[in-house]
Amino acid sequence: MIVWKLIFYFSLIMLGYVYVGYPALVFLLGKITKRNIKKKAIEPFVTILIPAYNEEKHIAATIRNKLELDYSAEKIEIIVVSDGSTDKTEEIVEQFADRGVQLLRQGPRAGKTSALNLAVPLARGEIIVFSDANSIYESGALKAILANFADEEVGYVTGKMVYVNPDGTMVGDGCSAYMKYENFLRSRETRIGSVVGVDGGIDAVRKVLYQPMNPDQLPDFVLPLSVVEQGYRVVYESDALLREDSLQESSDEYRMRVRVSLRALWALFDKRAMFLSTGNLLYAWQMFSHKIVRYLCFLFMGPALAANLMLITQGLVYQLFFLLQGSAYVLAFLSPLFERMGVKSKIAYLCYYFTLINVAAGHAFVKFLMGKKQVLWNPRKG
């Protein structure tokens, strides 16, 4: 029984550390360090890069959105990189040529990272802004992002991604709750130095800090890490708001989570030297806590339940924990049924989404161990 107790308590401690302990420590450290950003309204020349693959449904609205931002039109350059699109994406982009929008073709299809590598050397902007093909910014988002670059220590800025879920699906509710948690964590990490990981739909970097990446690398993760390696901060700006429809289908969300997790694991492997460097131990701890252990939580969930079952006769504490764990997994299992019946249960939806992202992480980890990588994927459905 001693072995089972060790497994049980170790698993619970690790799960608690990832989702409660680390955020609490970052919050407390932020209260002590308070690394403020010297923000100031500035208007540098910027290039907005929009990689796109078969985005005929969204690209026109995205371009109009960028053209209508609250920012001097003569100080914005918009480049759309078509990654071998086979629909009407390129035709639609060309309709905006008279408004200065440039179309850059990449062929054959090589993925988002290659598209960025192709476009950045051609960009004239001092600041490079990254937008997804379906990213709609609020009017003042660009100014909010750029104000951070008045601080010479800031090299990369990420905005606030908010997933909207008009249909109230279980995946949408779970995704929205997850992003609220992530945005809170990023706001706290900014107060101690730099955030770990960004979304990529509303981000900006100093052009001089951009380093070309391998096609299989995740730009939303590798590029910010490269900026930190160069001695600059990666910060979060809550006033730079991006609203995006959440995915509605579990299968779509699952595939997206597997892909993102797999590419993040490879990014962590590629940047493993950052864990060994003594130059920034604080950030190494953040990477370990926010990313590595987070992606490995599936390794603790199963053992926690199995050990709890073996200890269920050992006292009331174990019985209560088994009830809590069992109830959570039952709710996760029943969530699809609840949704079909029209029963709204946020607790059930959260249990379902928590289980989904951790199973996806486990799936990605197996693919990582097998040496598999993913460069190409179809556009996000939202």
Image: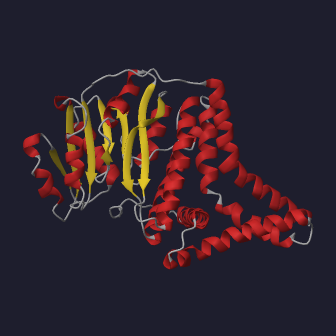
Residue placed at 56% from the left, 48% from the top? 181
Residue placed at 21% from the left, 40% from the top? 68
Quarter assignment of residue 143: top left
| Quarter containing the N terminus | bottom right
Residue placed at 49% from the left, 27% from the top? 231
Q: Which of 282/109 is in front?
A: 282
Position of 93 with respect to 149 (left or right) is left
Residue 41 drawn at (x, y percent): 34, 22
Position of 16 with respect to 196 (left or right) is right
Vertical position of residue 243 compared to residue 69: above or below:
below
Q: Which of 45/121 is in front?
A: 45
Seen as rendered, the residue at the extreme front is: 343
| Quarter containing the C terminus | bottom left
Residue 364 drawn at (x, y percent): 53, 63
Residue placed at 15% from the left, 62% from the top? 88
Residue 266 visible to the viewer: no
Residue 111 drawn at (x, y percent): 32, 56
Residue 303 drawn at (x, y percent): 75, 66
